[in-house]
Image (spheres, rainbow, N blue to C red):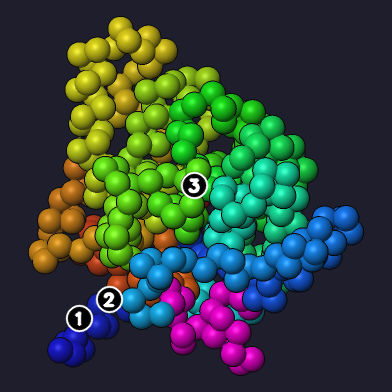
Amino acid sequence: MDMPAAEARERRGRHSALKVLDCDVHPTVSGGMKSIYPYMSEAWARRFERKNASMASLALTTKYQHPNGSAIREDTRNEAGEVGGSDPRVVVSDHIEPHGIEGVLLNSLQASAFCCALASTHESVALASAFNDFFVDKWLSVDPRLHYAMAVPSLDPHAAAEEIRRVGSHRQIAAVSIAPINILLGNRYWWPLYEAAQELELPIVMHPSGADSIYQGTPIAAGGIPDSYIERYVTLCQVAESNVNSLIVNGVFEKFHKLKVLFAEFGFTWVLPLAWRMDRTWRQLRHETPWVKRSPIDYLHDHVRFTTQPLDEPQDPRDLDRLVELMGADLLCFSTDYPHWDNDMPEDSLRSLPDESRTRIFYDNARATLRWS
């Protein structure tokens, strides 16, 4: 049913006055492994060539293939027919400009998958550096509104710390992207990485890698292995829930006072009951974790943020508005997930929230969380 003209004008007016930062856009290396060979040593390039390494190996098992063939929108291809997200100029012309977006955070899922599961530990270190140098060279030079969540090898936190110190000072690198593995973020394993990230004032971004619940070493949905795309998609939020709990209960934010963590593409409607449960349990059993000196809810509001996408939409929008009011608009950062099928565009998202809350979610919170240039 067509939207009434008056409502459409009102929506356009509200959106035009809204500043927008998009905290989750996915770039793609369209030329495969050979595109990143120039960004690694000759020895490593030859090794991958001899193995006939390919980014096509990222293909999911049949049961997790998208029911419509691809998670990437067909209408986002460039003039050469290359897959959506592979051309930075198209991202600017097709996404940033039409929606009046002031900055986007690029997060490579190809890099993430190699950094957590699809390569050996040594290989993941070389690949993370190559991906980072590729995106700095081929993407960040195109437009100052493009920012990047640098890849780090989740399998080696010391090498990850070295990589952060190597390239993390680039002015358009806005965050450090950690691909989830089956070691929770509160574990001391991650401390070298956190120390380096805090040193360079870079937040951590955790995002599903695409390898989750598929490859050994990645997080598996609670209770067992999902049996379809839909089942896996719905249960991905469990990974974030476990890691938020781990960060707070293990006292990470007492040791790293300036560290901030953004959970991207896990949704957020589960956050409020988790916060209540953490707070109640901590108050009853706080002697078990004396290093947790404040309520878990306080740590949550001071250090943790969640992207809005995928946006769960109840039949009555007022239910979602009430949830945001209860949990606090300060916890949310707007994201689109462009160019994926379930992306949420700014003019169509959280429309019924008060203007003050939308301003915080679409701009202010991201500005305060990520290290924008």
Report the amino acid beneath label 1: Glu
**Alpha carbon distance from label 3 to label 1:** 50 Å
**Alpha carbon distance from label 1 to label 2:** 6 Å
Residue 122 in view: yes
Report the amino acid beneath label 2: Arg
Q: Nearer the viewer, mark 3 or mark 1?
A: 3
| Residue topped by disc 3 | 216
| Residue topped by disc 2 | 11
Taking the magenta stretch, the answer to whether it contains residue 76 is yes
Tell me: 60 left or right of 134: left
Taking the magenta stretch, the answer to whether it contains residue 115 is no
Give how far across and how far down residue 294 sits, in percent.
34, 18
Q: Residue at x 27, y 76 (%)?
A: 11
Q: Residue at x 36, y 80 (%)?
A: 68
Q: Nearer the viewer, mark 2 or mark 3?
A: 3
* Residue 271 in which image quadrant: top left
Of all residues shown, which one is farthest toward the right?
A: 42
Q: Earlier in the sequence, mark 3 or mark 1?
A: 1
Compared with residue 312, is residue 257 higher up or lower down, i.e. above or below? Answer: above
Mark on residue 183?
Answer: none
In the image, which residues are magenta?
70-87
| Residue topped by disc 1 | 7
Mark 2 closeness class: few <14, some 14–19, many ≥20 residues within 10 Å? some
